[in-house]
Amino acid sequence: MNLLDLDARGLADFFAGIGEKPFRARQVLRWIHQRGEHDFEVMSDLARSLRENLAGKAFVQVPQVISDNTSTDGTRKWLLDVGASAIEAVFIPETNRGTLCISSQAGCTLACGFCSTGKQGFNRNLRTSEIIGQLWLANRFLGATPRGERVISNVVMMGMGEPLLNYEAVVPALNLMLDDNAYGLSRRRVTLSTSGIVPMMDRLRDECPVALAVSLHAPNDSLRDRLMPINRKYPLKELLGACRRYLDRAPRDFVTFEYVMLDGLNDSAEHAQQLIEIAGEVSCKINLIPFNPFPDSEFKRSSSEVIRRFSDTLNAAGVTTTTRKTRGDDIDAACGQLAGRIVDRTRRTIRLARVEA
Ligand code: SAH
Ligand code: SF4
């Protein structure tokens, strides 16, 4: 058993199953996640018999690092081997915080046209160990600040994949991020971004309400249908309903709406007005993301002038709006550029057909 697949409860159950005292699990949790240890032999305050029992029945294993690149702006990206495919995790240092952006799936089934991950197709869901393993690895690489503080103060599930379509593996990983015996982050500092999987938003609200970001990207159904195919299944009205229900339990009193700025597509004055109406229905903040290009992307980024005007219109109407800084684009680590190396298992035939055509 890979102990990185288990949150505190899972680990206690595992301990009971191998005839050990469940409360010992807490000690092991601290060794693994707080001290970044994988070798049971080093866990000196555990009884020898427990260490031997663990060595025979368990291990701590994270994905292999394939590459490790640092951008001129300090953003750092790791490419990690998860079998046939490879996934990416990105660390973004800022003045007052350090944010780790992690992946939940190898690829994505949802195929939003403006997203490099979506364009790649889908390989498989990541295991809990592969999700929390990204944080475990980044922590080991980054260490602590000179004052002994954690370098990673925030985690965002905004990497590759749709986290709410890998719910069963994502929630134990979230639990570990929040657990005082593991990473001890507050719910406000852990953000899950979803394209809007309505029923799973309700489950997350009931079971593990972390801060929520929703990829909106269009203020009406006809445009959102075009940009994000998932809208045909969960249209705006249902999505906004789920956001309102989420707010009852959310750690912040707003939902963040992400809105990628696509030249000539979703960036007009009329779109801004429609967005203002939506903001009237759900307590929210809007985060504008200048589109980041990738090979074969058929969209263009709105000009900075248009983005500024769009943002000003929203702010003037009382809708708090920020524009995300593009970070790490020289190492293809910016939002939507994460491609990893996906061996597609869903659309391979389509892609082959395209190549032949
Ligand atoms: N699947 C989830 C989380 C991962 S995407 C989701 O869609 O929310 C993280 C954010 O980057 C999303 O808001 C996504 O829409 C946005 N994004 C995708 N492609 C982009 C691109 N090329 N440029 C800018 N943002 C992009
Ligand atoms: Fe998947 Fe999110 Fe990319 Fe859409 S934007 S394809 S949901 S990862």
Image (cartoon, grey):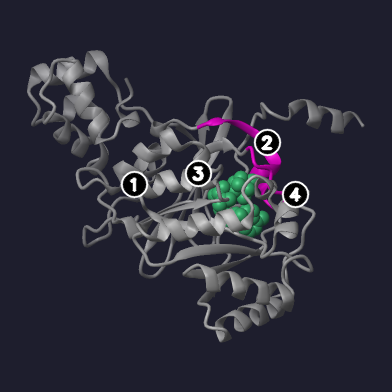
At 89% across and 28% down in the image, what residue appears? 356
Q: Which x, y percent locates residue 229? A: 70, 47
Element marked by disc 2: loop
Q: Would you say residue 302 is visible in this rendering?
A: yes
- The mark that comes first in sequence, 4 or 3, is 3
Q: Which x, y percent locates residue 338? A: 60, 47
Which numbered marker is on residue 295? 4
- The mark that comes first in sequence, 4 or 2, is 2
* Residue 91 within the segment the image draws in magenta: no
Element marked by disc 4: loop
| Amino acid type indicated by mark 2 | Gly
**According to the image, label 3 marks what residue?**
199
| Amino acid type indicated by mark 1 | Asn
| Amino acid type indicated by mark 3 | Pro
Which numbered marker is on residue 139? 1
**According to the image, label 2 marks what residue?**
121
The Cα–Cα distance between marks 1 and 3, rounded to whole angstroms, is: 33 Å
Query: Vertical placement of 126 versus 303: above or below?
Result: above
Q: Which x, y percent locates residue 105? A: 53, 37
State left or right for residue 222 relative to residue 134: right
Circle 4 or circle 2, nearest the eye: 2
- The mark that comes first in sequence, 1 or 2, is 2
Query: Vertical placement of 68 versus 124: above or below?
Result: below
Circle 4 or circle 3, nearest the eye: 3
The Cα–Cα distance between marks 3 and 2, rounded to whole angstroms, is: 23 Å
